[in-house]
């Protein structure tokens, strides 16, 4: 008989809105609702050990861990206070190294690509693009001026997918991603390829899947699955209605795990139709 052993941290210890697991050493890096950035040693997953807590401005809503040279960094979306970058090279002594809040409202998600940081913010037209220097100074490039409050951003190769709440999903092509200090002098570009408006209810999340598919989650239609091999002409290939609001999702091979508000965690297997059977958006 196979059993599953679980370890739950009490609410008094952790109130996460998002987390990321990193290795070497194995750590759980948490965007905590009240505590800010919280780091746990999970070398023994059944006996996690608290390493540090770092108070951040606003409410830590989302975190993305990345590396520049030999520095391990965490970009954190802070609701009400914009973007904060923390040095977590020493996980027992994390420190804030950069922060920006100008022109932000309630930052939801953050995504890094090399030295590029994309911030999804609830300010109208709220996708913001930053670079990061060797000195860890933020370089503000621009705000993407298309209507809508940006809820989420995801990246796959040179494509950026953004959830725009009541304005559907936007697909961009990203060019000139900075990978070195010198590259920061060339402004990265986001070319808008297509906007999807199947429903204008409330797009919550966008999740790139294997084999050039995209899952779009919203509070009315559940999960829509698109074929984005041609990102300028996405094809709707499947959808399924969730019992409650589809908030966010994660992917493991051909399985999609959906957090669905009071309905709990829903797990579905992808059964994708051939492209010829897809329905044009």
Image: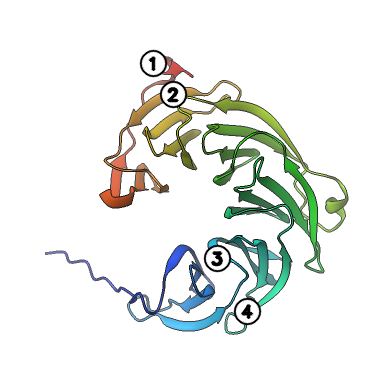
Q: Residue at x 34, y 36 (%)?
A: 270
The 10 Å Cα crowd at callout 2, few under 14, some 14 to 19, many 20 or more, is: many
Q: Quadrant of residue 10?
A: bottom left
Marks 2 and 3, how far apart at CA: 35 Å
Do the CB atoms of the residues marked 2 and 3 lie less than 8 Å apart?
Answer: no
Q: Which mark is residue 94?
A: 4
Please state the horizontal and vertical placement of residue 243, each as a whole percent of the image. Answer: 26, 40
Query: Residue tagged by mark 3?
Result: 59
Marks 3 and 4, how far apart at CA: 17 Å
The 10 Å Cα crowd at callout 1, few under 14, some 14 to 19, many 20 or more, is: few
Q: Earlier in the sequence, mark 3 or mark 4?
A: 3
Q: Which mark is residue 277?
A: 1
Q: Earlier in the sequence, mark 2 or mark 1?
A: 2
Above or below for 110 versus 7 = above
Marks 3 and 1, how far apart at CA: 44 Å
Observer-side mark, 4 or 1, equals 4
């Amino acid at each position: 008989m196979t059993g599953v052993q679980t370890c739950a941290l009490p609410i008094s210890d952790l109130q996460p809105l998002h987390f990321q697991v990193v290795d070497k050493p194995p750590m759980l890096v948490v965007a905590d609702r009240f505590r800010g950035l919280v780091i746990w040693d999970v070398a023994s997953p059944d006996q996690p050990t608290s390493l540090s807590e770092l108070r951040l401005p606003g409410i830590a809503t989302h975190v993305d861990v990345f590396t520049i040279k030999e520095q391990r960094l965490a970009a954190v979306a802070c609701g009400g206070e914009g973007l904060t970058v923390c040095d977590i090279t020493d996980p027992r002594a994390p420190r804030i190294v950069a922060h920006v809040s100008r022109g932000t409202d309630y930052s939801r998600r953050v995504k890094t690509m090399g030295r590029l940081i994309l911030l999804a913010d609830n300010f109208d037209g709220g996708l913001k693009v930053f670079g990061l220097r060797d000195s860890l100074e933020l370089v503000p490039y621009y705000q993407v001026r298309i209507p809508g409050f940006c809820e989420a951003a995801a990246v796959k190769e040179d494509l950026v997918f953004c959830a725009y709440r009541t304005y559907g999903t936007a697909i961009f092509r990203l060019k000139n991603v900075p990978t070195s200090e010198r590259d920061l002098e060339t402004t990265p570009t986001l070319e808008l390829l297509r906007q999807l408006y199947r429903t204008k209810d409330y797009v919550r999340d966008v999740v790139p899947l294997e084999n050039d598919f995209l899952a779009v989650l919203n509070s009315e239609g559940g999960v829509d699955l698109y074929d984005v091999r041609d990102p300028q002409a996405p094809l709707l290939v499947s959808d399924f209605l969730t019992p409650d609001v589809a908030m966010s999702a994660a992917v493991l091979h051909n399985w999609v795990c959906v957090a669905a508000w009071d309905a709990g965690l829903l797990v579905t297997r992808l059964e994708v139709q051939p492209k010829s059977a897809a329905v044009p958006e």
